[in-house]
Amino acid sequence: MPKVVDIRHLETFFAEAEDVCIAVHTHPDGDALGSGVAMLEYLRRCRGKRATLLLPDPVAQYLRFLLPADGWLEASVAPQEAERAVAASDLVICLDMNGFSRAGCLEQALRGSRARKLLIDHHQGPERASFDLVFSETEISSACELLYQLLLALPGVGSAERLPLEVLTPLMAGMTTDTNNFANSVYPSTLRMASELLAAGVDRDALVDAFFHSYRENRFRAMGRYLQDLRITTDGVAYAVLRRSFLEGFALQEGELEGFVNLPLGIAGVRLSVFLREDDGHFRVSLRSKPGVSARRLAAEAFHGGGHECAAGGKLYFPEDIAAPELAAAYIETKTARFMRNPAPSDKD
Ligand code: 5GP
Ligand code: MN
């Protein structure tokens, strides 16, 4: 639970701010977008502030129903507008990222801002020195759950019923996606939150429908091929490398591969799932693991990344890390064979 003295600070930050910029991590997922939209709507509707939600990249189609009519912009599409918004703000709030390095094209503008800086996040290793106030909690489902607890703790709030559905619905959305619909990272506080939000009128059926029952058919065709071609090593590592031709062949859009990486963990004996998809000059890497295997450590050691113990990500560059994209499979096999000899989380964090 957040400390009372920090909540007082938070209340002061909100009370004294006039123009707020809210930023979330690159390639925003449900938790990033949900927490960003909830923060935006709280500040506008409950506090009467001017606020802008800055999304480093375009929001994937499957999440767009969460976006309000206005108050947000996609920084890679409108970089000057985004920079102007940061320059005009007196409070910068970063959500669902542990530091500015996860803010993509917004990194320099945010870092250089003279505004007060607030971090609300659930990843390990928060970049504390860059912020004036930090709420960092890792034993929690999502940034949305942490933001929910903070909003409830503010003077005059106290219960979900005091917050509008425009705040509560995106909070439920982000918590639902970050827990993979209550399959992982679920704590007693997570179920309490779900129960309170349902009682306050959030339509969970509509969210489940939007997230899990509204895909295009080609996602499932692609999923079939992915599972067919999946490789599994003797160490219990399942991996797949999706090349451009695969992505183009199924006409896949951003977000349509969401969740693929989780599937191999359903196989007995698989302890780590490694999922690569090709981008310009690099592969984007997603890692998922069963407890005892640190996806986060592997992300840091082999893929320039990080994340949570059992859900992490990063990048694999060519020609820097591997001479050519064809060598990705060999790289994964070599790195994971060594890693699986001692896959536990490192004890220095
Ligand atoms: P996903 O596989 O869903 O893209 O990401 C899973 C987790 O890994 C998320 O919590 C995300 O924050 C983290 N993550 C993904 N990509 C990167 C990256 O490039 N760098 C770092 N530090 N974390 C990442
Ligand atoms: Mn998150």
Image: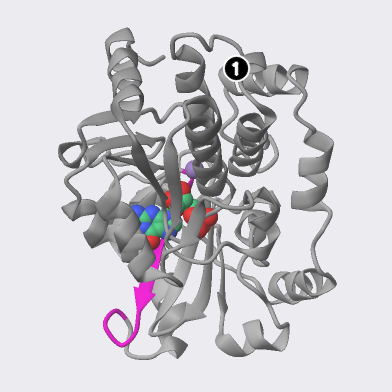
Residue 158 in the figure: left or right of residue 165 = left
Q: Quadrant of residue 186?
A: top right
Q: Is residue 338 visible?
A: no
Q: Position of residue 27 (x, y in %)?
A: 49, 61
Of residues 58 and 325, the one drawn nearer to the viewer in this rendering: 58
Q: Residue at x 84, y 37 (%)?
A: 205
Q: Within 8 Å: ligand 2 and the Cβ of disc 1?
A: no
Image quadrant where one finds the N terminus: top left
On screen, 109 above or below 7? below
Q: Residue at x 45, y 39 (%)?
A: 292
Q: Residue at x 62, y 15 (%)?
A: 162
Q: Position of residue 336 (x, y in %)?
A: 41, 63
Residue 71 in the figure: left or right of residue 197 = left
**Mark 1, secondary structure of its residue:** helix
On screen, 123 above or below 243? above
Of residues 66 and 181, the one drawn nearer to the viewer in this rendering: 66
Where ligand 1 lies, by image quadrant?
Answer: bottom left
Of residues 127 and 296, the one drawn nearer to the viewer in this rendering: 127
Amino acid beneath label 1 = Pro
Q: Is residue 319 magenta?
A: yes
Q: Is residue 136 visible?
A: yes
Residue 178 in the figure: left or right of residue 304 = right
